[in-house]
Image (cartoon, rainbow, N blue to C red):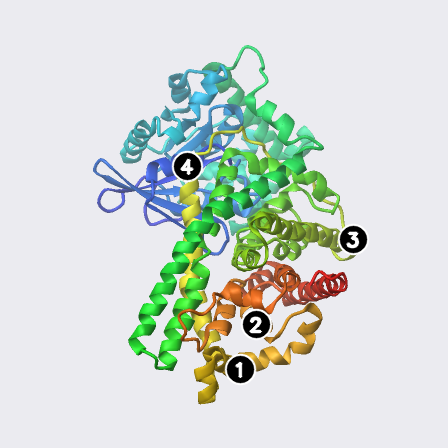
């Protein structure tokens, strides 16, 4: 009857050898991922669950005689699914049948966090309660009788401080002991009152008559979900009679209580939680104004909040430039020496293979990898802000502004992810409640500067602007993208996606000192994805663009080549496929101040924005054998003005998203029409604004 409840292995069955699978569940901001990092360290793998875009984190840990496979479930508040995260978390508990589940509870918010734990106990999973951030709770005046709570819930309870790794050993001991115990799967049966229990009983009896394979715990839990009108469970029920009995009882409860059955059942759980809280927890005698309250009074201030946020982003960009520049120089010098070493094998011979390796592979990939320090530092700064609790405030702050453009603060989260990459940002719009909000947010996400555009900015800004203007210029480009995204969202909600804006609801977690270990792990995971992209797609595109720039090959004039090798290279590129395509685009590019070289690089940028840098390097370096030749920045400075440089950044900021973004837009919107509308709409907007900036700037003498 329910495929996801069927399994060849019965509940609690041991896996081969001494391997155990442990799941970690908990509310967002409960410290769940910190506990996961403390258990697994660097032995982690990050991917997506099959068929959805929800992130899956798996780690491994050796504890005693057991090898633990630890799964960090998505942060959820309930097992009643209203999002992909909740569906995934619930299905993992059934399909993968973990040997034990660690429920991480924020010790400062016990009542709210226990709601998920109660549902897990009702489900019958082997449960260990992890009271995390116990030090912060005790400093606020909370006192706990964890032994009493353990007896009442019939589950081990362990106090931890995840970021200090306090209590982690005790947590692992309790988890392994429970996972290997024969009676580990002990359920909790909440008494919901006579009427609700009668409804559950009638549905359960009908289920038993139709499917005798279900255990008592499974049958009660399914009956409870059907009375709650859980759509995910209803879709899995094959027998219409069971649904009919469930609907009849749900309707009866709604008439009797004047509320939806889901609310009645939730009240029953909270009544139990209140009783448990009174028995096992004593709160502070007086409600004190916490440090979080004092900080929020400033950072979420009606007038100070947004300027502080923008100032913080400026400091992040300054931090990125200052610390990243020396490391970039080392990497650039290293790739330069590698290119010379590889090229020396051919002497002065001008072979296609030499050009491929030196200019296509080493020059192309090296031209992108040189920006890895800046990208890693940017990711590190964002990770620290996320773990500190500030990013949730950023969404709250931006809600006031985004509400004016027809969106709300929840839409700001995917847009924030867009600073990393537009593809996961568009996927993250699944958390939005209605299709209008999703489509509007998806349309404007490419206007947020992703990390793939950062190499373009990092190439151009130091080449054309003095040191004191570099951070302000980068900040200005990012700010333009944000303002354009907001303005575009307003226009789309007025003209295309009309309708009421849904309500905004988001939890503001308490501030905490971020752990460098967790931030570095997140930074490395994101930087690793960039490295993987550079080593695969960018390498392939560099070779492809080298081929487009190298064929058909022409025989340069011998005297011209001796006099100026770069002239021979220019002749080759001019007659190549890419050069001819760039020249064909000339009349269109001219009003923006662009030439065929920029046009050629823009062709590669459609595949991946960062390929623009590699292609510009190939365009300028192909055929150059002079080891004293100028750097790419020197050549750009020689051929273009600061106004043209700014227009390049402006156009690549606004114009058509990369190929991967177009593909994910089509999949998430389920329509090529929306994907093409985004592609041509952004390209047209980029052209109009760039022409306007260049023409006005030229007439003002800025060029």
Marking on residue 494 = 3
Q: CA distance from mark 3 to mark 1?
A: 44 Å
Picture layout, residue 18 above or below residue 601? above
Are discs 2 and 4 less than 8 Å apart at CB?
Answer: no
Marking on residue 516 = 4
Instruction: Please state which of the two labelled residues, at mark 4 or mark 3, is closer to the viewer.
Output: 4
Earlier in the chain: of badge 1 and badge 4, it is: 4
Under circle 1, the secondary element is: helix
Marking on residue 126 = none
Observer-nearest of 341 and 679: 341
**Rendered residue at 35%/64% (across/down):** 337
Marking on residue 603 = 2
Furthest residue in direction top, as rendered: 285
Relative image position of residue 501 (x, y in whole percent): 73, 45
Under circle 3, the secondary element is: helix
Picture layout, residue 649 above or below residue 167? below
Instruction: Please state which of the two labelled residues, at mark 2 or mark 3, is closer to the viewer.
Output: 2
Are discs 2 and 3 less than 8 Å apart at CB?
Answer: no
Under circle 4, the secondary element is: helix
The residue beneath circle 1 is 577
């Amino acid at each position: 009857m329910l495929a996801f409840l069927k399994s060849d292995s019965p509940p609690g069955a041991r896996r081969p050898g001494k391997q155990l699978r442990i799941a970690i569940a908990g509310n967002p901001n409960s410290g769940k991922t910190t506990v996961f990092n403390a258990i697994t360290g660097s032995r982690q793998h990050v991917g997506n669950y099959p068929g959805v875009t929800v992130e899956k984190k798996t780690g491994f840990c050796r504890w005693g005689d057991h090898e633990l496979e630890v799964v960090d479930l998505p942060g959820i508040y309930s097992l009643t699914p209203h999002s992909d995260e909740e569906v995934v978390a619930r299905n993992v508990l059934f399909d993968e049948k973990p040997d034990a589940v660690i429920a991480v509870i924020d010790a400062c918010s016990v009542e709210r966090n226990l709601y998920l734990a109660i549902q897990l106990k009702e489900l019958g999973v082997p449960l260990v309660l992890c009271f995390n951030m116990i030090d912060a709770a005790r400093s606020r005046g909370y006192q706990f009788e964890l032994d009493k709570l353990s007896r009442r819930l019939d589950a081990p309870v362990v106090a931890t401080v995840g970021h200090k790794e306090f209590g982690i050993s005790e947590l692992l001991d309790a988890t392994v002991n429970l996972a290997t115990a024969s009676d580990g799967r002990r359920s909790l049966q909440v008494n919901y009152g006579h009427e609700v229990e009668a409804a559950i009983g009638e549905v359960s009896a009908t289920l038993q008559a139709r499917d005798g394979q279900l255990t008592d715990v499974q049958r009660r839990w399914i009956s409870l979900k059907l009375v709650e009108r859980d759509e995910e469970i209803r879709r899995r029920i094959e027998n219409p009679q069971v649904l009919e009995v469930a609907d009849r009882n749900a309707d009866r409860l709604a008439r009797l209580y004047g509320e939806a059955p889901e609310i009645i059942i939730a009240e029953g759980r909270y009544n139990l939680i209140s009783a448990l809280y009174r028995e096992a927890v004593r709160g502070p005698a007086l409600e004190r104004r916490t440090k979080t309250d004092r900080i929020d009074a400033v950072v979420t201030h009606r007038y100070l909040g947004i300027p502080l946020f923008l100032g913080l982003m400026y400091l992040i960009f300054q931090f990125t430039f200052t610390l990243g520049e020396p490391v970039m120089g080392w990497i650039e010098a290293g790739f330069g020496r590698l290119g010379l070493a590889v090229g020396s094998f051919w002497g002065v011979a001008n072979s296609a293979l030499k050009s491929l390796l030196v200019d296509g592979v080493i020059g192309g990939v090296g031209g992108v990898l040189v920006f890895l320090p800046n990208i890693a530092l940017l990711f590190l700064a964002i990770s620290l802000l996320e773990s500190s609790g500030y990013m949730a405030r950023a969404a709250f702050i931006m809600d006031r502004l985004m509400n004016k453009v027809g969106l709300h603060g929840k839409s700001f989260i995917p847009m924030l992810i867009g600073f990393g990459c537009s593809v996961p940002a568009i996927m993250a719009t699944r958390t939005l409640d209605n299709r209008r909000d999703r489509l509007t947010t998806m349309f404007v996400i490419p206007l947020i500067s992703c990390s793939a555009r950062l190499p373009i900015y990092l190439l151009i800004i130091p080449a054309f602007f003095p040191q004191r203007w570099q951070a302000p210029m980068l900040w200005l480009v990012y700010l333009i993208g944000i303002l354009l995204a907001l303005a575009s969202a307003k226009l789309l909600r007025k003209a295309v996606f009309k309708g009421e804006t849904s309500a905004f609801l988001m939890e503001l977690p308490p501030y905490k000192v971020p752990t460098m270990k967790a931030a570095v792990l997140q930074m490395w995971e994101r930087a690793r994805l960039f490295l993987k992209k550079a080593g695969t797609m960018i390498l392939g595109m560099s070779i492809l663009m080298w081929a487009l720039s190298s064929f058909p090959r022409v025989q340069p004039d011998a005297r011209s080549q001796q006099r100026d090798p770069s002239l021979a290279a220019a002749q080759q590129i001019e007659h190549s496929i890419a050069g001819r395509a760039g020249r064909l685009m000339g009349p269109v590019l001219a009003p923006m101040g662009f030439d065929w070289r920029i046009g050629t690089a823009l062709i590669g940028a459609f595949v991946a924005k960062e390929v623009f840098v590699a292609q510009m390097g190939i365009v300028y370096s192909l055929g150059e054998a002079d080891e004293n030749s100028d750097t790419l920045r020197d050549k750009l400075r020689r051929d273009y003005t600061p106004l043209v440089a700014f227009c390049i950044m402006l156009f690549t900021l606004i114009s058509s998203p990369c190929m991967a973004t177009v593909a994910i837009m089509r999949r998430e919107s389920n329509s090529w029409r929306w994907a093409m509308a985004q592609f041509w709409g952004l390209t047209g907007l980029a052209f109009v604004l760039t022409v306007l900036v260049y023409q006005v700037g030229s007439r003002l003498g800025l060029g």
